[in-house]
Image: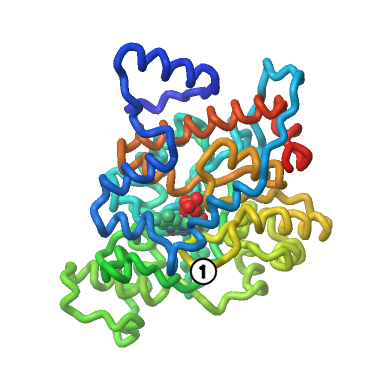
Amino acid sequence: MSNEKVTVSGPARQGEMYIKGMMGAKPVVPFDPAKLAAQAKEKMNPDAGGYIIGGAGTDDTIRENVDAFGKYRIYPRMLKDVSVRDTSTELFGVKLPSPILTCPIGVLEMIDDEADKAVARATSKLGVPMIMSNQASFPMEEITAEMGDSPRWFQLYWSKSNDLVRSLVQRAEKCGCSAIAVTLDTTILGWRVQDLDLMHLPFLKGQGIAQYTSDPVFNTIVANMDFGDNPLKLPPDLGVSPETFKAVQTFTGVYSRPSITWEDLAFLRSVTDLPILLKGILHPEDGALAVKYGVDGIIVSNHGGRQVDGAIAAIDALPKVVEAVRKAGSDMPILMDSGVRTGAHIFKALALGAKAVCVGRPYAYGLALAGQQGVEEVLANLMAEFELTMALAGCKDLNEITPSTLV
Ligand SMILES: Cc1cc2nc3c(=O)[nH]c(=O)nc-3n(C[C@H](O)[C@H](O)[C@H](O)COP(=O)(O)O)c2cc1C
């Protein structure tokens, strides 16, 4: 499939669908987000479904992430001349066609062999920045090779080894990433009931650890690892090759450092000049601390309800974080993810102070249903719906999406 750039226009996309429909075509992926999720679930095997769709505990936060958007109502204005519309924005000096990025999602090989590479091709066609996951299925060098000059960020999990952190960040710089998003909410894995019921964790099969096995520092750790240090007490007969076994065992030993604190951010700052964003901020006091500790941006997120069952919905957390950050004197960009399913959700997030949103599960559902094309369709639909929502609310560009557009 070609990587030729595509510009999305809301009315043109809508018109194209109705005309193709006259010729007997059917949608590549459903437009209705609930149908998209349901069809993707049908297509995935149970292990993939459990991991991709499932969340922590009772899935309470997954539901709340989406339902909470309903509390904020758009207040449309009329007679505003929205004939010329501009959905573009800028983040860290990079122009984006729409205020949308893709969330880092690990282990996409569970649903598509091309995994992150397919996402890279789809996002680069649309000019949507891709946030590559630390738990990707391919090394970042192979993912970015698919992207031309399209914008990309790297998502970091803070390893027990600072040398590994430095190495991953430096590789991301070489891969042309324009920001590092460090995920703070997953220093320990949440209690994921669907995975537990299946007694299944993909990493133990060696899936989702390509950023590690392709890393020279990680491979030195593997070579020098004292295999007495076996945090998950892996039995030797795990059913994987001896090489994978060693990598998995090392990964489970070094992947995360639950002891990190605000003071550790200075280390990350010392190894890169790239903008650093904190992913997983929900509390306004943490927003103020992010200002104090000199980071460059925030992604308000509860990890798609995968970590703390019962956590506040991300859209409810957003306005208070924005208020705290602005009160602390910073105009740093604040993004949000968790629950974004429609163009109206994107509009509401912007009206509540987000600079942009990150789209997660929906693009994974597109990938599961139709590979690269499925990802493209899901993202293009969101871009189109957002543009139409913006126009119909009486706004011709993002500057006009202010708190007064909501009640
Ligand atoms: C299957 C899956 C894997 C994920 N892997 C990662 C990851 O590797 N790194 C990360 O920071 N967040 C990860 N996330 C969280 C997403 O980046 C994002 O916060 C979440 O998907 C937003 O919720 P939503 O998809 O329900 O909108 C993952 C989410 C899912 C669903």
The location of residue 25, given as percent across then percent down, is 31, 19
Observer-nearest of 1 and 167: 1
Horizontal relation, residue 68 to residue 288: left or right: left
Observer-nearest of 139 and 329: 329
Q: Quadrant of the N terminus?
A: top left
At x 35%, y 12%, the residue is 22
Q: Amino acid at mark 1?
A: Val
At x 32%, y 66%, the residue is 195
At x 50%, y 72%, the residue is 187
User: Above or below — where is 351 with respect to 22?
Assistant: below
For residue 273, say whether it is visible. Answer: no
Crowding at label 1, few (<14), some or many (≥20) Cα neighbours within 10 Å? Answer: many
Q: How is the image coloured?
A: rainbow
The location of residue 63, given as percent across then percent down, is 49, 56
For residue 383, say whether it is visible. Answer: yes
The location of residue 49, given as percent across then percent down, is 31, 55
**Total tally of numbered discs in the picture:** 1
Horizontal relation, residue 300 to residue 129: left or right: right
Observer-nearest of 30 and 5: 30
The image quadrant of residue 203 is: bottom left
The residue to which callout 1 is attached is: 308
Horizontal relation, residue 337 to residue 42: left or right: right
Q: Quadrant of the C terminus?
A: top right
Horizontal relation, residue 12 to residue 112: left or right: right
At x 42%, y 24%, the residue is 4
The image quadrant of residue 23 is: top left
The image quadrant of residue 95 is: top right
The location of residue 64, given as percent across then percent down, is 54, 57
User: Above or below — where is 63 with respect to 348?
Assistant: below
Is label 1 within 8 A of ligand 1 (CB to nearest ligand atom)? Answer: no
User: Above or below — where is 174 with respect to 87?
Assistant: below
